[in-house]
Amino acid sequence: MKKVLVIDDSALMRRVISDIINQDENLTVAATANNGEAAMEQLTHGAKFDVLLVDIKMPKMDGVRMLRELNRAGIRTPALIVSSIASESGRETIEALELGALDFIKKPISSIGENFADFRVDLLQKIYVATGLDIHGGGFHGDPRNTGSSRTRADSDRSGRDFTRTATEPKKDITPPAPRKLHTARKGSKLVVIASSTGGPKALQSVVPFFPERFPYPIVIVQHMPAGFTNSLAQRLDEMSKIKVKEASDGEELKPGTVYIAMGGKQCELIHKPNGSYCFSENDKPPRGGLRPCADIFFESLVDTAFEEIICGVLTGMGSDGTKGISLIRQSHNVKCVVQNKETCVVYGMPRAAVEAGVVDDVVPLEEVTGMLVKKSGA
C-alpha cells in the first residue's frame, strides 16, 4: 500500500482527491496538509510518504517554496503538482517542475462529468508512475479511454518496472492516413521535431538551451500539456536559450532558427502554402488517445511537405505517441530519429516504442540529445 500526502488549502479539493485515492486498492491517503508549511512540519519530523500531491497557490508556504524547502532538507519523496489552469499558475507550475516535481495534474473544473473523469484517471495514473506501481498488474481501475495517451507498448517508470495501457479510441481516430506526398523536396530544406510527455518540461531544459543561436532550421516541440501552460514553458525556455523560443500560434509562418512549442489544448499541424512557405494550424480537432496536442497528428501533417529531411527527437514520456507518425513520414521523406535513453528518462515509454518499431537511428543520454540532433541536421 503506497502512502500519499495531499497538500492543498482547499478542504473540498483535499476531500475530492482523498476519495479518489482511497478507492484504489494500492493507495491510501496517509495524511493531508492545508499548506506547505504544515506539510514540511510532518516531513521534517520523520513522517514517510511514497508521493506528495502539492498545490501551487497556498497561504504561508506555496507549492514552489515547499519544493525548494524539500530540496534544501534533502527530502527526495516524489512530488506531483496538482494545479489549476489559471494563467498566473502556469509559470509557477513550470518552476515547480524545474525544482524536481515529477509531473503535474490539471485540477477539474467541477466534480462531475467528463472533465472530472479525466482528472481521476490522470491523477491515479501519475501516482502509479511516481510510486513505481504496475498499472498493468491488475490494481489500476482507470478508464483507458481517458488515460491521456495510447498505451499500446510497455512504458517504464524510474525503477525500471513496466506497465502498459491499451487505448480504446475508435479505429478512425488512431489509424493515420496513407502517405500522399505531393511536393518535390526542396534541397536544403530541413525541419527538427521533438516529441515529449511525462518529464518533458524539465528534460527540454537540457535540450533546447543548447541549440546554437544561429541554428539554420526551424524546430517544433510537441509536449503533452493542457491549455494555459505551454506559453509559460516557451517563455521559460526562451529565457534560458540563445535561440528564440515561442509558443506556436494559429496561422503563424514557420521560420528558421526558431523553436516553436505546440499550443497546449490544441492539435498542431503544419500547412504547406501555395507560395512554398509553411504555417501552423492550431485547431480544435479531437484528441487522439486523449492527447491534444498529439505528436502523431503533427507528423502526419508533414507527409504533404517538401522538406528534404526531417530530424526527429523523442524524449521521456508514457505511451507511444510519435512512433506511428515517424513510421508514416519515413515512407515519404528522408527521416533521422534520435531518442533519449532509458537511464535518463523519467518514463521510457515513448522512446521505447520508437526503438521497438525500428525507426530510431541513435539512442543517447539526455545531455547528448541536442548535439546528436544538430549533427544529424548537418548544421
Image: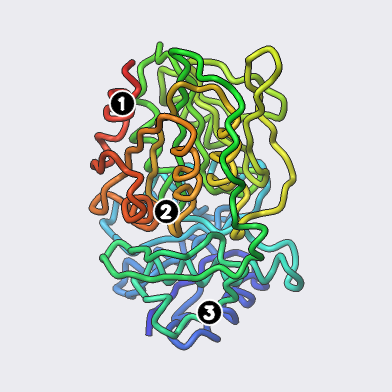
The answer to whether the residues at label 3 and label 1 have Cβ atoms under 8 Å apart is no
Residue 164, x across and y down, in percent: 42, 70
In this rendering, would 69 be left or right of 146? left
In the displayed structure, would residue 315 be above or below residue 281?
Answer: below
Give the spatial CA distance, label 3 vs label 2: 23 Å
The quarter holding residue 109 reads bottom right
| Number of other residues with Cα within 10 Å of mark 2, as a class: few under 14, some 14 to 19, many 20 or more | many
Identity, as a three-letter code, of the amino acid under mark 2: Gly
Of marks 3 and 2, which one's residue comes earlier in the chain?
A: 3
Disc 3 target residue:
21
Viewer-nearest of labels 3 and 2? 2
Q: CA distance from mark 1 to mark 2?
A: 22 Å
Looking at the picture, which amino acid does disc 3 mark? Ile
Residue highlighted by disc 1: 376
Q: Which residue is mark 2?
A: 317
Please, is residue 39 above or below residue 291 in the view? below
In the rendered image, the quadrant that contains the N terminus is bottom left
Residue 111's tag is none
- Please state if 273 lies on the left or on the right of 45 as rendered: right
Q: Position of residue 166 (x, y in %)?
A: 51, 70
Amino acid type, mark 1: Lys
In this image, 283 relative to 21: left or right? right
| The C terminus lies in quadrant | top left
